[in-house]
Image (cartoon, rainbow, N blue to C red):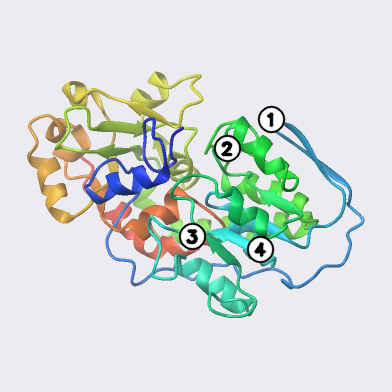
Amino acid sequence: MTSPLFPGPLSTRRTLFSSAGKAAAVLAAATLTLSACSTGPASPVSDATSSSSSPAFPVTIEHVYGKTTIDKQPTRVATVSWVNDDVAIALGVVPVGVPKNEWGGNDKGSTPWKDAALEKLGAGFGSAKAPAQYSEADGINFTEIAKLSPDVILAAYSGLSEEDYKKLSEIAPVVAHPEVAYGTSWQDSTAIIGKALGKETDATKLVSDTEATLKDKVSQYPQIQGKSFIYGNLEPAKGDGVNVYTANDNRPRFLTEIGMTLAPVVADNSKGSKEFYLAWSAEKANELQSDIFVTWVPDASTTDAIKADPLLGQIPAIKNGALVADSDNTLTLSISASSPLSLPWSLDTFLPQLASAADAVK
């Protein structure tokens, strides 16, 4: 099993998080501190406590493991992985249970954007209406989810294995990812979850409003338009420390949506692949041609190490000063696990960093 944050086969999320602590293999986004992040449009769109039946039910949702029919509008929603809880909350539904954000999260095991949305719904963590939280550091937490007696489990954005899916289905109907593990766009996740919750109209509006916010913010940085990019993960301490993210991943997808172009070297070498990343030999780092290179780093010293590395320093964008190196895990998460809540939050921090790199393009 792989993680959407860390390329490569990984046994558990705990392994992933430990690796991250050593500067290992995250991927990611762009920039600096998170202090001045955008508010965006993604206020919850309806009453979280609404439980009125919807004429849309029953609904049947197709996914990678078949079809799931939901007979009645769910009132007890549990989620797995990232994104799914954000979408439910943005649609005004407070889940009965959500995973903790153990990587990139705050001391509540949450994120700033989720905290703000839950507060608006009167369900902030620590309150009586708050969702229960469970750890996914060792994988899907079947025991804690079962205790909540959910009537639907949302996993539209996930990497559920078929075994996980079958086991979760013994608890409640499961809405699995449609095709590629960790490859569901935030728009598709929103549409799928909107259907599952009987809120398709709200979901359509949420996508439209969020895209309008993105368009408005991006218009302030015209130098970004048309620039080619590679979104990857560079580890100067490891001989095999180069991974780049393919068009299946939400990070390149986001940059494409704001008017940039995935570098041909990545598009050509991942054509037809269903993987979200592509391992790349550091010996061929100089072939990673793009205007801008974006990577996650554990700290500023790693940025300097990348620039000084005899192989990684030959990446054309890095030689030109067009490297975006992000050492903020929360910001990284907001892009990596894109949602209608996280993206608006990230823009005021991420876009200026991206624009600075674009200004350096020669």
- Answer yes or no: do the residues labelled 4 and 3 have beta carbons within 8 Å? no
What residue would you read off at disc 1? 65
Residue at left 60%, top 48%? Answer: 142
Q: If you read the primary sequence from the N terminus, does the residue marked by circle 1 or circle 4 appear first? A: 1
Quarter-of-image position of residue 233:
top left
Q: Is residue 165 above or below residue 142?
A: above
What residue would you read off at disc 3? 100
Disc marking residue 160: 2
Report the number of discs. Answer: 4
* Residue type, mark 2 in image: Leu
* Residue type, mark 4 in image: Pro
Disc marking residue 95: 4
In the image, 68: left or right of 90? right
Quarter-of-image position of residue 117:
bottom right
- Answer yes or no: do the residues labelled 2 and 3 have beta carbons within 8 Å? no
- Answer yes or no: do the residues labelled 1 and 2 have beta carbons within 8 Å? yes
Q: If you read the primary sequence from the N terminus, does the residue marked by circle 3 or circle 1 appear first? A: 1
Q: Tell me the crowding category of disc 3: few under 14, some 14 to 19, or many 20 or more residues within 10 angstroms, Cα based.
A: many
Q: If you read the primary sequence from the N terminus, does the residue marked by circle 4 or circle 2 appear first? A: 4
Q: If you read the primary sequence from the N terminus, does the residue marked by circle 2 or circle 3 appear first? A: 3
Q: Tell me the crowding category of disc 1: few under 14, some 14 to 19, or many 20 or more residues within 10 angstroms, Cα based.
A: some
In the image, 258: left or right of 20? right
* Residue type, mark 1 in image: Tyr
Kind of element beneath mark 4: loop
Give the CA separation, mark 4 to mark 2: 19 Å
